Image (cartoon, grey):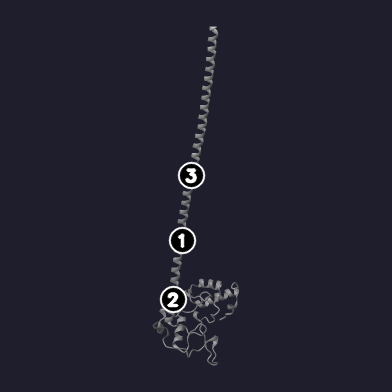
Amino acid sequence: MDKCWLTIRNRADRRYIRGIDGFLDWAYSQPNVSSLIRCPCKGCMNTVFKLRNVIRLDLLKKGFWDSYKVWDLHGEVLVRDDNSHNVCNDEVEFDNVGEDDITEIVHDACGCTKMEESCGSTSLATVLGKRTSSARGNEYGKKPPNKSCMQQANFEASLSFAIEKARQKMQTNMNQKFQEKREQMMRANMYQKFQEKCEQMRAEMVKSFQDHIEEEFRKMRVEMDKRIQDQIATVFVRMQQQGQSSSITRNDVANGGD
């Protein structure tokens, strides 16, 4: 299988894109493959099961995992040359592999880690069956997984898909609640601003009314003071006129007596 496209660093190159599509076509043509397979991008590194279109986007954005030379987790099977006793494509014999090494290899093949309790000794015995002289590893030749391992992989794929669905649903609910809370805060903020505006308008109206009343009172006081002064002046003039009339009368009386 041609893997020269893996050396192309420009992920926008048409040869790289054709290589991705060819890899996905080949991976999904394997027997008993489901809609979810391991994603070999640099971010997932074959630890996450995803759909084809998602894997394609990851490979375009992040690139193909450099250390994944032999596509054994996607169905590639290597053949050993018995005549030359050489190994094709870096295949290595494991005649002296111990039980712990086989356990670790099966853990890796099933997508389990050493910390996961689900890949215990009982399940490993079921997956391994009889010990063989060859085992699976990240950079070595592999044997096709047996039925139990495929069931384990399918279970992990379903679990990964369910977790992703639950995460998306939870994210959607969180976004919806955040939006509702934001709208509620905006409405509360708008109501608060409306109340503040009403209070400001009321204060301005009260002040304007008070200023108007005070101005009217001032005008009334000025008018009243003017009227009082006019009345006082009128009375004073009358008093002067009456005083002058009395003086004239007294003078007339005095002159008549003479």
Mark 2 / mark 1, whichever is N-terminal: 2
Residue at 54 percent across and 16 percent down: it is 244
- The correct choice, above or below, for 194 with respect to 71 in the image is above
Give whichever of 132, 77 is nearer the camera.
Answer: 132
Mark 1, secondary structure of its residue = helix
Q: Nearer the viewer, mark 2 or mark 3?
A: 3
Task: State the separation of the CA atoms marked 3 and 1.
Answer: 37 Å
- Name the amino acid type tagged 3: Ala
Give whichever of 221, 52 is nearer the camera.
Answer: 221
Q: Nearer the viewer, mark 3 or mark 1?
A: 3
Q: Position of residue 3 (x, y in %)?
A: 57, 80
Look at mark 3 in the image and give the residue it sits on: 203
Q: Position of residue 108 (x, y in %)?
A: 47, 81
Look at mark 1 in the image and give the residue it sits on: 178
Task: State the separation of the CA atoms marked 2 and 3.
Answer: 68 Å
Look at mark 2 in the image and give the residue it sits on: 156
Q: Which mark is residue 5?
A: none
